[in-house]
Image (cartoon, grey):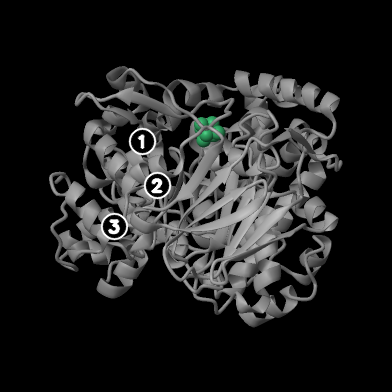
Amino acid sequence: MKTIRGESKKYLEIDLGKRSWSVFSPTEADLRDYIGGKGLGLKMIHDRLGNRLGALDPLDPDNILAFMMGTFLATGAPCSARFAGVTKSPLTGIMVAASCGGPFGMACKTAGWDGVLVSGQAAEPTVVHIDEAGVRFEAAGELWSMETGPAQSRLVDNPRQGALLIGPAGENGVLYSVIRSGHRYLGRGGMGTVMGAKNLKAIVATGLSCRIEPADPVAFARLNKKARTMINRNAFVRSYRAYGTNFGVNPGVDAGYAPVRNFRDRTDERCRNLSGEAMAERYHTTHAVCAPCTVLCGHKGTYPDGVKRHIPEYETIGLWGGNLMNFDPDIIGSWNDRMNELGIDTISCGATVGWAMEAAEKGLRPSQLAFGRTDNIAGILDDIAWRRGEGADLALGSRRLALKYGGLDFAAQVKGLEMAAYDPRAGWGQGLNYAVANRGGCHLNAYPIALEALFKFIPQYSTLSKASWVAFMEDLFSATNSTQTCQFTIFGYLLEPPIARFTPKPLLKLAMTLLPEVAQLVLDWSALSGLVSAITGRPIGMRAFLKSGRRTHVLERCMNLACGITAADDTLPRRFLEEAITKHPVKSVVPIESLVKAYYRKKGYDADGVPTPRLLRRLGLPSLVLPSVVGAAR
Ligand code: SF4
């Protein structure tokens, strides 16, 4: 078996229209500057599309779908199953990157490929097969129209294989359709829709023909052990391990970030029926995770109907639970299964259905949907995937519907991407995060609600330190998402080194609130950056790691500016800016203007939200294309 030291540096470039493929390698400078995963994927798309990016219809054959294997993938580092998908989103019209821990990543990387770039449109529905020798095209035949579960069973018949595939939603142009791999998903922004527009049903990788060894095995072994120790003892990780992401339900009821009745109220005691603790007891849950994983957040359990199901994630539970005034976890489990089979993003769909329920209540749009009514949801999901009846409309997502019927003020989306299940009035940093996140209403951009409402390191209802933490965390997450280790490990790396662990919590809280830049200077993520060095053989210190994350984030911002984003898009729906009274005892609206202004300053953007030439120079961003891109956006 061939041994690869860290990374093969070989990428497949597939043109579906020409049924051709080639191999290319990124420059050493790009590997150093962008690490891999999300960052390198954005850079490759940027270089290939250049000034065509802005006007490009995301469903045009020329759009590029990049699948980027993580630096950590297949090395044995913590949570190292993950890979990225990057493209221009049909839902938002701007860039989208997502992360997935399904088996495609392991198969692709151990076939010797660090990534796959797909462009063009196949003349007929197609399945692409890749292995160590290269690429083979095959007609999808009867797989087209098939739901993801049966299609995947047909495509993958041995443990060396992993597939990426779409369901009917992606084939039929639902703007928020997903790509499935195993029981994991590239979930946001309609990546499955791009794949469907390319007539691409699936990519099947056959791997395990190469062994991935770190470039420096001794340093890797030492850092891997250290990282695992830190991750294992982190309280956040232990909660995930015990109850999955739904450990966040009860704190959401208390802290007031639970989405209730299309984000009108931000708490409801009945949401506790949907908590991780309640579901662990009800379904006798066991782990079902990305492989390999150190955190173990995923769970499955046996439902009262006897079916063994994957427990829906917190976002799905939030948006299909209290958000729709439904407090029955059993029925959300069955809807979650249905959406996974059809290939639908549970977050965008849940928020769109919530909007439709409120729009119907307000008489803006007739609908069979109503808060608390659950009997017609399963049928609606099929109608969305097949674009029938009301489903054809709902397949467009909440922003397009609100522009068509009115009701933009209560469409829980930013830049067209539906918000995740955290009401931003419960954490003003979370509000800022949604407003400025590159891909739109994304909770994972910086995830400040964890600092505000879960760890309670910084106050929920204050602007103090928020711009600084959002700017810092999004750089750190951008870099982390270029290694493609799981973001859920990050608090283990940050909070378990001695400097954070042995500082008394009140002192840590004070420093994080009043002197955030000082706190960021003393935090230590050297184990994470050290693992990157040990795997790739390219030394990268923790400051350079952070700078790489900022470079990726700013590059993505520039690409979005080229796609037409302006400072006016860096805001929240009016509900979160004006409606202070909810069921939660604390009245709160997000003071978004001052937060965004402070954030622009921290980030090195000008008052229009455009990265300054000084920042671009400091990050060494490409000088040929970007100035014209940024100039065109102003
Ligand atoms: S923590 Fe959860 S999402 Fe992250 S790699 Fe493990 S199972 Fe996957």
Indicate which disc, 2 or 1, sits on the residue closer to the N terminus.
Answer: 1
Type of amino acid under label 1? Pro
Q: Quadrant of the N terminus?
A: top right
Q: Is residue 78 visible?
A: yes
- How packed mark 1 is, by other alpha carbons closer than 10 Å (few <14, some 14-19, many 20 or more), is many
Task: Where is residue 573? Give x, y as percent.
Answer: 39, 61
Task: Where is residue 257? Give x, y as percent.
Answer: 39, 41
Judge by depth and name the residue closer to the eye, 268 or 616: 616
Q: Quadrant of the C terminus?
A: bottom right
Circle 1 is placed at which residue position?
A: 312
Q: Secondary structure at mark 1?
A: loop
On screen, residue 331 above or below 410: above
Q: Is residue 223 left or right of residue 442?
A: right
Task: Count how many numbered circles sit on residues in the image.
Answer: 3
Q: Secondary structure at mark 3?
A: helix
Indicate which disc, 3 or 2, sits on the residue closer to the N terminus.
Answer: 3
Type of amino acid under label 2? Asp
Type of amino acid under label 3? Ala
C-alpha gap between disc 2 and disc 1: 19 Å
- How packed mark 2 is, by other alpha carbons closer than 10 Å (few <14, some 14-19, many 20 or more), is many
Q: Is residue 406 left or right of residue 552?
A: left
Circle 2 is placed at which residue position?
A: 423
C-alpha gap between disc 3 and disc 1: 19 Å
On screen, residue 233 above or below 357: above
Judge by depth and name the residue closer to the eye, 165 or 64: 165
Residue behind label 2 places its C-beta within 8 angstroms of ligand 1: no
Circle 3 is placed at which residue position?
A: 385
